[in-house]
Amino acid sequence: MLRTFLPVLLLLGFVVLNAVLILGISHMTIKAQPTPVKSIPYESGITPLGDARERFSVKFYLVAMLFIVFDIETVFMIPWGVYYRQLSCAVPMVNGVCPAGQLSFFGLGEMLVFVAILVVGFVYVWKKGALTWD
């Protein structure tokens, strides 16, 4: 069992060792010299105006979360597209080809159900007004 996870454990160990080494070397070699000029926020060459802790509308975060949810859901279509031929064949494929008369609509049907669920979620969000900007 350890043999199957050995590459993952080696990679994890390398990543942790690398992170600790980089942080340690930067801590030992760089001396902090704070000045008032270095302490002010700087963005795009514009002198900062007001407080950096500005409040954002909840709509901004809601739209961002909805984008992530629907974006992640569409990623699930990639494996389906890769295995579509196998999913649409009622018997095991022979040399990558489905035997004549053995096609099924299982692969297409499961993706249609998946897309229908996404559409229902999208319509719900749309009807709730989450996608309108005021």
Image (cartoon, helix red, strand yellow):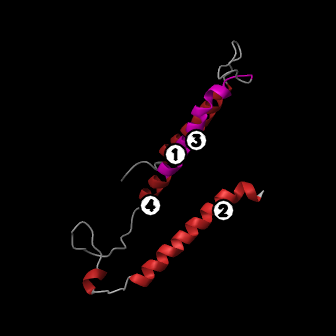
| Dominant secondary-structure state across the stretch colored magenta | helix
Ranked by sequence position, the earlier of labels 3 and 4 is 4
CA neighbours of label 3 inside 10 A, class few (<14), some (14 to 19), many (20+): few
Q: Nearer the viewer, residue 57 or 77?
A: 77
Q: Residue at x 53, y 49 (%)?
A: 69
Q: Left of 88 or right of it: where is 127?
A: left
> Quick one: SS at disc 4?
helix
Give, as a three-letter code, the residue at label 2: Leu
> Quick one: SS at disc 3?
loop
Q: Which residue, given by chain and number where applicable, does mark 3 sit on?
A: 76
Q: How many marks?
A: 4
Give, as a three-letter code, the residue at label 4: Val
Q: Residue at x 36, y 70 (%)?
A: 54
Q: Which residue, given by chain and number where applicable, does mark 2 sit on?
A: 9
Q: Which mark is residue 103?
A: none
Classify residue 60 by image quadrant. bottom left
Ranked by sequence position, the earlier of labels 1 and 4 is 4
> Quick one: SS at disc 2?
helix
Up the image or down, 84 lies above or below 10; here it is: above
CA neighbours of label 1 inside 10 A, class few (<14), some (14 to 19), many (20+): few
Classify residue 88 by image quadrant. top right
Foreground mark, 1 or 4, reads: 1
Give, as a three-letter code, the residue at label 3: Phe
Foreground mark, 3 or 1, reads: 3
CA neighbours of label 2 inside 10 A, class few (<14), some (14 to 19), many (20+): few
Q: Which residue, given by chain and number where applicable, does mark 4 sit on?
A: 58
Magenta span of residues: 66-91
Ranked by sequence position, the earlier of labels 2 and 4 is 2
Residue 4 point in image, percent of width and height: 72, 54
Q: Residue at x 55, y 37 (%)?
A: 78
